[in-house]
Amino acid sequence: MGWRRPDPGTITYGELSIAGLGGIIGRADKPNRMVKADYLEALRQLVRQRSDILLLHESPEIRAQGLPGNSNIYKELEGASVLLVCNEHIHWEEALAELDAGPQILNADGPVYIFTAAVLD
């Protein structure tokens, strides 16, 4: 089995929509990397789908809060209607950040988070 490009995708479970994009921005001849233009276009497409949760491997940089990552990803998430973005790749001391205009960002680099769903009558 050879290396597979980290293509974007979306699944729906009940009424919950989860989108995801693997890999990081980098040289496309290396595993799990996409050139910047392709990665950002894939991210734009996922953001336009208005999923509830967006899973990314690479972290956005949030300068105002001192959180390292990729500033290009941050720009794409500003104003996005996605409720929650989960990412990793770069460790943050604070695991949860909230954009002024956009989603909450949960950096899962290190800890384990378990989400459960409750059915309400």
Image (cartoon, helix red, strand yellow):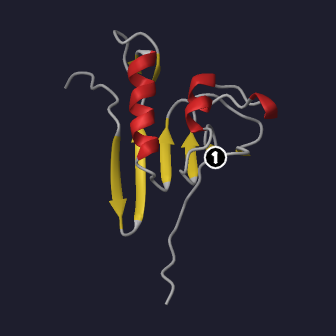
Residue 115: x percent and y percent? 54, 62
Residue lying at the far left in this picture: please name it.
1
Residue 106: x percent and y percent? 63, 46
Element assignment for label 1: loop
- Between 120 and 102, the one nearer to me in the picture: 102
Residue 23: x percent and y percent? 43, 27
- At a point 49% along the width and 37% down the height, the residue shown is 56
- Between 109 and 39, the one nearer to me in the picture: 39
**Residue pointed to by mark 1:** 102
* Relative horizontal placement of residue 64, taking residue 46 as reference (left or right): right
- At a point 33% along the width and 42% down the height, the residue shown is 9
- Between 33 and 104, the one nearer to me in the picture: 104
Residue lying at the far bottom in this picture: please name it.
121
Q: Is residue 59 visible?
A: no
Q: Quadrant of residue 31?
A: top left
Amino acid type, residue under disc 1 in the picture: Gly
In the image, residue 17 sits, relative to residue 119, either above or below, namely above
Quarter occupied by the N terminus: top left
In the image, residue 118 sits, relative to residue 47, either above or below, namely below
Q: Is residue 106 visible?
A: yes
